[in-house]
Image: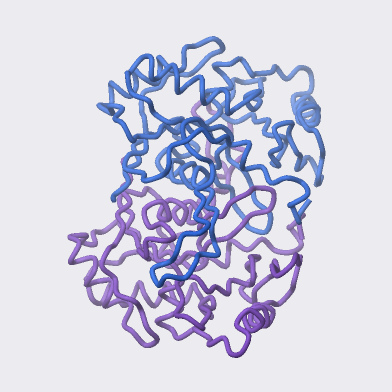
Chain colours: A blue, B purple
């Protein structure tokens, strides 16, 4: 089935305390984008963090204040190179500068990750259902680097209404052989797909994905964090 | 702009020596999928490898033969756990079992990665242009695990007609601040997006992506391999 990824244009600059669900519902309606049952809403965490007030002023030497903030947001620092740290956040995510970001932030401020992105996704989903009457799963994204591969990709850091992992264990391939590749990080693929329609510079922080055949459920993006004991690359 | 990801149905089982471009052109035509200028074709490496004859019989104890083959295809073994090896291939990719795969392979055989996936992508692009009159960029994918995050995602292992990385250095965000997140692995995001439409078990090995606003170019998926000196996680 064909999948369509619609950018959601027209969202204003989001400020602490804003009703993000209301802003998104209005933008969807203005763009003629339903939502319809089966749609999935993808939102970059930046607007979620801003609406939740997870914005910190950088006082004095901004670069130094930013570095200090990134260290404060880190539970563990895995690697350090120049000003860059690769850190584990308290959510368990391993990413650059513990997810603290100054791009698309007001001058003199930095945006943190949401305190509990799965909970943020759930709240946004409930509020959108209340406003639109449609239960639309939500994926909150951030942009992460990877070991071994250059370039950044968007991944899911908070979800609601979907399983994080598509579990194909026991499924057979077209030839009847049991699949060995069995756990697909489907919400990370949704996050990456949505980024293609949003872009980093365009200031479009949301996309509606239509036509996905992925299992609904009550997964959490926290399920994507590989437990340290299973992780061969700490 | 809306992006549409169309699975390409109706491809037959591909065998060594098959004219893959011809099979894909026929399947696209039968599905009413142009191609049109601006489309990008995504193909799982499995059918490319099969057409190129990169298929190896597993003789004797199949499991042992498979493990031996994975080691033979490895330039360096980074980690080992039970039967699983995380290896660097001669292409530079770091992945499970050096990309050797038995799913969606004929019984008693394993499929290798293409010898030179960028070259394979280029050949497929030229052959498709010859057949259809349209120059469609090609992305060849495989399914890779990641450090730190559970689940697998599709990534680009060979490309033609696109840049591998969308370089946003010097670009400014909506507020006029220079972006710090500047190198987007856009072909990996395309690979992930296409997987959502293809699925692992459904036996649909190709998708046509329409509406992407990504820069054309003559990049290589080999450009995605992070040089060992820059890599903090070997």
| Percent x, y of residue B61 | 63, 85
User: Relative to residue A200, is residue B97 depicted above or below?
Assistant: below
Q: Nearer the viewer, residue A108 or B24?
A: B24
Seen from the viewer's position, the closer of residues A160 and A94 is A160
Give x and y (percent) for residue B46.
45, 72
Question: Which of the 4 image quarters holds residue A223?
Answer: top right
Any part of residue A62 in sight = yes
- A137 displayed left or right of A39: right
Give the answer, above or below, for where B38 lies relative to A137. Answer: below
The percent position of residue B226, horizontal first and vertical second, equals 66, 61
Q: Is residue B24 left or right of residue B92?
A: left
User: Could you tell me which residue is drawn at 62 percent across and 24 percent down?
Assistant: A114
Residue that appears at 37% across and 48% down: B213
Foreground residue among B128 and A171 = A171
In the image, residue B173 lies at what x, y percent? 52, 32
Q: Is residue A204 visible?
A: no
- Compared with A98, A144 (above or below) is below
Q: Total marks drawn?
A: 0
Name, please, the residue furthest toward the front.
A170
Q: Would residue A135 appear left or right of A190 to someone viewing this image? A: left
Above-or-below relation of B78 to A108 = below
B114 vs A9, left or right, is right
Quadrant position of residue A197 = top left
Closer-to-camera residue (A170/B71)? A170
Q: Quadrant of the N terminus of chain B?
A: top left
Q: Residue furthest bottom?
A: B59
For the C terminus of chain B, the image quarter is: bottom right
**Residue at point 50% right, 42% down?**
A187
């Amino acid at each position: 089935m064909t999948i369509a990824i619609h950018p959601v244009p027209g969202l204003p600059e989001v400020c602490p305390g804003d009703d993000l669900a209301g802003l998104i519902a209005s933008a969807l309606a203005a763009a003629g984008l339903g939502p319809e049952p089966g749609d999935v809403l993808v939102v970059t965490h930046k607007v979620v963090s801003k609406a939740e007030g997870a914005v910190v002023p950088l006082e004095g030497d901004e670069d130094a204040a930013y570095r200090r903030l990134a260290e404060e947001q880190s539970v563990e620092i895995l690697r350090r190179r120049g000003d860059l740290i690769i850190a584990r956040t308290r959510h368990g995510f391993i990413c650059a500068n513990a997810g603290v970001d100054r791009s698309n932030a007001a001058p003199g401020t930095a945006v943190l990750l949401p305190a509990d992105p799965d909970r943020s996704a759930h709240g946004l989903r409930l509020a959108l259902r209340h406003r639109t009457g449609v239960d639309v799963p939500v994926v909150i994204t951030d942009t992460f680097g990877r070991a071994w591969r250059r370039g950044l990709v968007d991944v899911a850091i908070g979800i609601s209404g979907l399983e994080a992992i598509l579990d194909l264990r026991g499924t057979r391939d077209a030839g009847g052989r049991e699949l060995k590749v069995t756990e697909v990080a489907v919400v990370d693929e949704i996050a990456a797909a949505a980024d293609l329609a949003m872009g980093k510079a365009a200031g479009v922080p949301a996309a509606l994905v239509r036509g996905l055949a992925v299992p609904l459920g009550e997964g959490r993006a926290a399920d994507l964090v590989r437990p340290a004991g299973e992780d061969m690359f700490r």
